[in-house]
Image (cartoon, grey):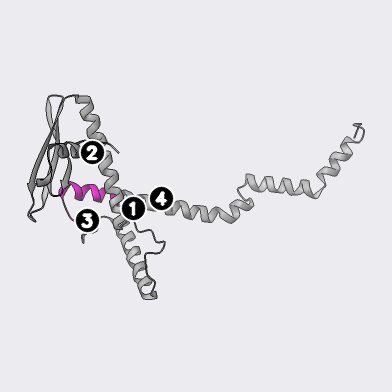
C-alpha cells in the first residue's frame, strides 16, 4: 500500500480477521493466567512444587538426625519418631515397600526414600567436608597449630590411627579429631604416616 488513503479500511479488515481475534484472545487468556500452558500444566507444576517443598523438609530433618546421632555416637536405625513430617514420610515409604513386595517387584525402582544407605553416606560425606572446611578456616586464622597421631587397637584387635589437630584461638586451645584410619598400622613407617596425614588434611 503506497498510500494512506485506505489505512482505516485495512485496519478494520485486520481487526476483523481470525488471526487477530485469536491473538487477542490468547493475550487476554495469558494475562489472566488462563493460557494453554497454564491450563494444562499449572496443576502439575503446583503439585511438583508441593512435592519439592515436602522433600526439602524431609531432607532437613534427616540431616538434623544425622548431625544429632553423629554428635552422640548413636545408631542410625532406631524406633523413635522424630516429628510428624518424618513419621509420615517413613510410613509412606513403608507402605510403598509392602505394596511392591506383594506385587512381586524386585529392586528399588524409581522410588525416592532419602533413607537408603547411599543417601546417608552422601550426607555424611558432605557434612564431613563442611566440618573440615570450618576447621581449616579456624586453623588458617590461628596460623599456629600442631598435628598429633595416636595409634591403638580397638576391642576387635584392629589397628586405628587417630589424627588430631590442635590450635589456639582467642586464648583458647581447641582440639579437633580430623580422621580415623584403619589398617595394619604396625607395617607403616614414618613416611607412610606423613602421607596419610597429608591426605587427611586435604580439603576435597
How packed mark 3 is, by other alpha carbons closer than 10 Å (few <14, some 14-19, many 20 or more), is few
Q: Which of the marked residues, 3 or 2, is nearer the chain's N terminus?
A: 3
Q: Is residue 169 magenta?
A: no
Figure check: 171 above or below 30:
above
Counting from the top left corner in percent of width and height, residue 78 is at 20, 60
Pick whichever, 67 or 109, lies toward us: 109
Mark number displayed over residue 35:
none
Q: Are marks 4 and 2 in contact (CB under 8 Å)?
A: no
Q: Quadrant of residue 143?
A: top left
Specify whether 8 is left or right of 158. right
Q: Which of the marked residues, 4 or 1, is nearer the chain's N terminus?
A: 4
Q: Which of the marked residues, 3 or 4, is nearer the chain's N terminus?
A: 4
Residue highlighted by disc 2: 199
SS for dot 2: helix
SS for dot 1: helix
Residue found 60% across the figure and 48% down from its top: 33
Residue highlighted by disc 4: 53
Figure check: 135 above or below 82:
above
Q: Which of the marked residues, 2 or 1, is nearer the chain's N terminus?
A: 1
Amino acid at each position: 500500500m503506497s498510500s494512506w488513503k485506505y489505512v482505516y479500511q485495512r485496519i478494520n479488515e485486520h481487526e476483523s480477521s481470525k488471526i487477530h481475534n485469536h491473538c487477542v484472545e490468547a493475550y487476554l487468556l495469558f494475562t489472566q493466567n488462563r493460557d494453554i500452558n497454564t491450563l494444562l500444566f499449572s496443576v502439575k507444576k503446583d503439585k511438583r512444587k508441593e512435592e519439592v517443598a515436602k522433600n526439602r523438609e524431609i531432607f532437613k530433618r534427616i540431616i538434623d538426625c544425622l548431625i544429632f546421632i553423629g554428635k552422640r555416637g548413636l545408631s542410625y536405625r532406631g524406633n523413635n519418631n522424630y516429628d510428624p513430617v518424618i513419621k509420615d514420610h517413613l510410613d509412606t515409604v513403608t507402605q510403598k515397600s509392602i505394596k511392591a513386595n506383594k506385587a512381586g517387584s524386585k529392586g528399588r525402582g524409581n522410588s525416592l526414600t532419602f533413607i537408603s544407605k547411599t543417601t546417608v553416606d552422601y550426607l555424611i560425606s558432605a557434612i564431613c567436608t563442611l566440618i573440615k572446611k570450618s576447621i581449616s578456616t579456624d586453623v588458617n586464622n590461628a596460623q599456629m597449630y600442631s598435628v598429633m597421631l595416636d595409634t591403638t587397637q580397638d576391642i576387635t584387635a584392629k589397628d586405628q590411627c587417630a589424627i588430631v589437630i590442635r590450635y589456639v584461638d582467642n586464648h583458647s586451645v581447641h582440639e579437633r579429631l580430623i580422621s580415623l584410619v584403619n589398617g595394619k598400622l604396625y607395617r607403616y613407617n614414618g613416611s607412610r604416616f606423613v602421607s596419610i596425614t597429608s591426605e587427611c588434611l586435604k580439603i576435597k
